[in-house]
Amino acid sequence: MKQELETAVAAACKKLFNVDVDVELTRPDEQFGDFATNVALQLAKSLGKNPREAGTALAEELKALPEVKDASIAGPGFVNLTLSDDALRTAVKKAPSALTKTYDGQLVVLEYSDPNPFKVLHAGHLYQTIYGESVANLLTAAGADVHRVNFGGDVGLHVAKTMWAILDDFGGEHPEKLADIPEGERAEWMARCYVAGTRAYDEDEVAKAEIVGLNTRVYELFTSNDRDSSFAQIYWTCRQWSYDYFNAFYASVGTTFEKYYPESSTAPLGLKTVKEQLAKGVYEESDGAVVFRGEPYGLHTRVFINSNGLPTYEAKDVGLVMSKWSDYHFDRTIIITGNDIVEYMKVVLKSIEQFEPELVKRTTHVTHGQLKLAGGVKMSSRKGNFFRAVDVLEAAREASREATGRDDEAMILGSVKYAFLKQRIGPDVIYDPKESVSLEGNSGPYLQYAHARARSIIKKVSGIQTFDRGGSSVVQSDGLQAQSPEERPRETHTSGESLDAASSLFEAGERSLLRKISEYPEVVDRAVNELMPHHICTYLYELAQTFNRFYEHNHVVGDPREALRLKLVEEYADTLQAGLTLLGIAAPEQI
RNA sequence: GCGCCCGUAGCUCAGCGGAUUAGAGUACUUGGCUUCGAACCAAGGGGUCGCAGGUUCGAAUCCUGCCGGGCGCACCA
């Protein structure tokens, strides 16, 4: 609807003023109308006209459009448009198919979460998982073929630190002692070892030297394909424990990754690529290391291969990017990480751009801020007072129990997801468990409740009217693309009245709700284009408020306009559900 | 020191390809449940949009400088 109107407004400008303009319609305050444009203000100068004059002429011209009930000039020169009720109804009916297929047929590789084996899944990983999953849903809705992948360090210094602490704990290379670690405590035990290893590395010179040695040994497990030595048995078992834990955790929050790219697999390719490009002059040697000089591009210099000949994170990332490229030949790849590595990533990508410019052109790096607990508690995975992914969920669970006395997992997950997603991606996120589980205000549970309440109205009516249709099938039916769309309510109750009432088919409250529902595709489009799900959150909350206002003043069941209103409730519930689904949040029929 | 990001109501945030009277939530005050789930709705107080310039008919939004906060700047990830 929006696009058609924009085209029509542009055409009107062409006709009236003989100019080509890109018209961007906005959604003004409801009192002004359904859409607004400021083209008159833009054009006034070049046309040498008074903006109100130009706007008045444009408004007159637009009144002739069949979709437009009213057009008027306002303020300095805005043209406000009000849709006809027919146009509004059509817009809502078409809403599901109105999504712009921005990514139609494109293969998109989405990389997020990226936890390291041998370390803990921390709160940031959870944030990325939730955000990434929502982006995946958005892209899919926009027509993309999305592949979720995950990158993580199964080699590197952090692994050596954990391994050192394990060996220290076991008093040597005793893989048989792994059996003593209870299954449910494996992940936590490894996290503790990492902390112990890190402390030893920082405080004990001897341990530090041993850890550096272990780092090389871990790499050698791969080059020599060692799976049998005592050291290898410990390493491979713990590595698998990590991946098992990741998979279980992701499943519990509703994500499945198609592919893990362990660093051990990207390191050789990265090393090879960097060495090749070293020969071609992209990288250069410096103090025994291989570096990329970023200064000519306004960036800084980074080490890709250290002076021991081992690939650093930089080289592994080169390998990762190259692996994804050869595996998928994607149209676009989106990498989601914390914003502490923005500059780092620029250097890595700039270096790759020197030999694979197309690949870099297709890469988007999205970053987010740190997750903080309300109250200003700081966390550090190094010190061991880390804020783990499970801690976030546990905090929500506890707050929810306190608030409702219940333990509803769908609601708890919805709380956390919504709390994370409602904020614009980028800045730090302050998470307040109590607020997130609150049933009042802009929260996940509020929306889940709003949805369940609407479903219960529908259920109630279907129970009274036609036992034949069955409650469950009614609520399951997708009203937005329903087989029996708006005709039924219209003909039943309103078509007759509408003929003499020149004003409108819908009463004010009904129209407000309908108008709000009609915005859905525009909001999703925007969220897709900006990769920002928070637009959907803002919208859904406004939608629920609009509905509650309608519901407060308009009876549905038993009203002469019941059929039409019921249809509205259905459209509303379907829209709410669709939006929540895009966010990765469950919309139960009952809570 | 250099670079990147961020400063909007007490708190947490929308709005930032300029524009119709700066919006929500929360907290506070008040009113509304014999009626479809009140987990709701309505009303009120609360803002020099960090500060100062600039561009513009018009700036929270764009540009410059400053102040405040976060992060990053060679062999960690």
Image (tube, rainbow, N blue to C red):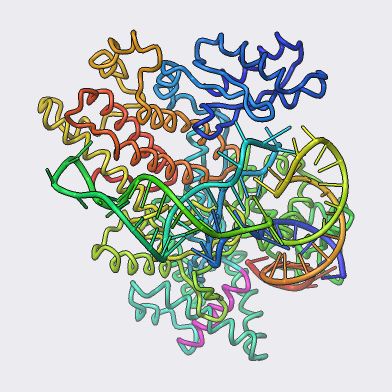
Relative to A87, A112 lies left or right: right
**Image quarter for residue A344?**
bottom right
Q: Position of residue A304 (x, y in %)?
A: 76, 62
Can I make out residue A24 in this image? yes
Magenta highlight on residue A425: no
**Image quarter for residue A156?**
bottom right
Q: Position of residue A268 (x, y in %)?
A: 67, 58
* Main secondary structure along the magenta-highlighted residues: helix
Relative depth, front residue between A563 and A106? A563
Relative to A225, A11 lies left or right: right
Residue at point 39% right, 27% down?
A511
Relative depth, front residue between A270 and A422? A422
Q: Is residue A509 above or below residue A244?
A: above
Relative depth, front residue between A426 and A269? A426
Can I make out residue A337 in this image? no
Span shown in magenta? A156-169
Q: Position of residue A66 (x, y in %)?
A: 50, 10
Magenta highlight on residue A161: yes
**Image quarter for residue A480?**
top left
Relative depth, front residue between A62 and A508? A508
